[in-house]
Structures are given as structure tokens and as C-alpha cells.
Image (cartoon, helix red, strand yellow):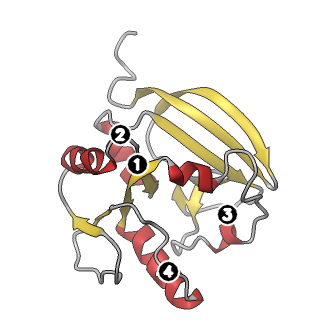
Amino acid sequence: MASTLDGFIADPDDSLDWLLKQDIDENGPMNYNAFIAEAGAVIMGASTYEWLVKHQAGTGEKWPYTQPSWVFTHRTLPGVDGADIRFTSAPATEVHAAATEAANGRNVWVVGGGDLAGQFTDAGLLDELMVSYAPVTLGAGAPLLPRRLDLRLRETTRNAAFVMAHYEVIRTNADIDQPR
């Protein structure tokens, strides 16, 4: 996920425009292309999906994922021609099982939003968190991950304007109060 320095992944209007203005080296350390090549399935919430569809319409870009993609929603949303998109309101555990099978040994990426990643965390299904911190503050918006977590820092690096951090999830809100 990309985050502002003050911990938001989208502004109060669910926009990522702040992110697209940042300088990043597409071939630099912890780059997106290397990351997405390891992903066999993608999971996202409706707000992330709607932003992507709106962004595509405005730029003419095509759907960014070749992987099967699950979109959590309680509404009927339009599909994208030629994309393998599966709309769902099933529990995170069920979707995770289906996405893991579809990923065929590769990673399952919970792309956004923060609350959706939190639901996977609550179910014990999030084991890593990779955050690209942009030199921006928003003051308000959608939080990175609105859950209490204990994390272990595995790696940091710089990629142009971003500080990249790779964390291992140690303990989640569900087991924070349990003895180690």
C-alpha cells in the first residue's frame, strides 16, 4: 500500500491523486513491477475499485491487473471488459481461500482499502505489510490500517520520493491481549 506520512491511503474524497504526483523509479528498489509479478490474485474494496475504474476512464488506461481480482461490495458495480473481476460480499476467509487457490502458489495481494486489509488481519490472513510512504500529509482521509498491530520491520529502502518499508505481521488486534 502507499501511505502519506500521516498514515492515510486516500484523501477524504477517496482520491489517490496525491499519490500519482510523486516521483518513483519504476525499476528502483522494491518497485511495483517486481512486486506485482509475484502476485497471483488481487483483492480490493469497492472504493478502490471505483477509483481505478474512474481513473481508467479519465486516462484511457486499461485494467491494471492480469490476475483474477476480487472486489468486496454490497452493491452492483459495472465490470471491466476483458478483466477477471469477481464481485463478492462473502467473508474474508472464503475469499482468501478462493484467491489462494487461484494464485497457484503466488502471493495474494490485498491492495486496499485499509479497513478491508484490517478484516483480513482480524481473520489472521495478513502476514506481511509493504508500505510505500510518500512525502505528503493529508490531515484526514482513509487510514492505512485501522487496526492495532504489532509488526516486525524486515526491510527499508528509498525509491525516489518514497520510503519503502516491508513488515511482518507479528500480532493482530485479535491476539494483542494474549500472552506471547
| Circle 1 or circle 3, nearest the eye | 1
At mark 3, the secondary structure is: loop
Give the numbered dot on residue 16: none
Residue pictured at 66% horizontal, 61% vertical = 139
Pinpoint residue 9: horizontal percent, then vertical percent.
57, 59
Disc 1 and disc 3: Cα gap in Å?
20 Å
Alpha-carbon span between mark 1 and mark 4: 25 Å
Residue nearest the viewer, comparing 89 with 84: 84
- The reply to whether discs 2 and 4 touch (Cβ–Cβ < 8 Å) is no
Residue carrying label 3: 138
- Which badge, 2 or 4, is on the more N-terminal residue? 4
Which mark is on residue 105? 2
Looking at the image, residue 83 lies above or below residue 35: below
Q: Check disc 1 and report its element: helix, strand or loop.
A: helix
The quarter of the displayed image where residue 136 is located:
bottom right
Kind of residue indicated by mark 2: Gly
Amino acid type, mark 4: Lys
For the residues labelled 2 and 1, the Cα–Cα distance comes to 20 Å
**Disc 1 to disc 3: CB gap under 8 Å:** no
Read off the residue under disc 1.
Answer: 117
Up-down relation of residue 130 to residue 78 (above or below): above
Residue where numbered disc 4 is placed = 62
**2 and 1 marks in contact (CB < 8 Å):** no
- The amino acid on which the numbered mark 3 sits, given as a three-letter code, is Leu
Instruction: Indicate the amino acid at tag 1.
Output: Ala
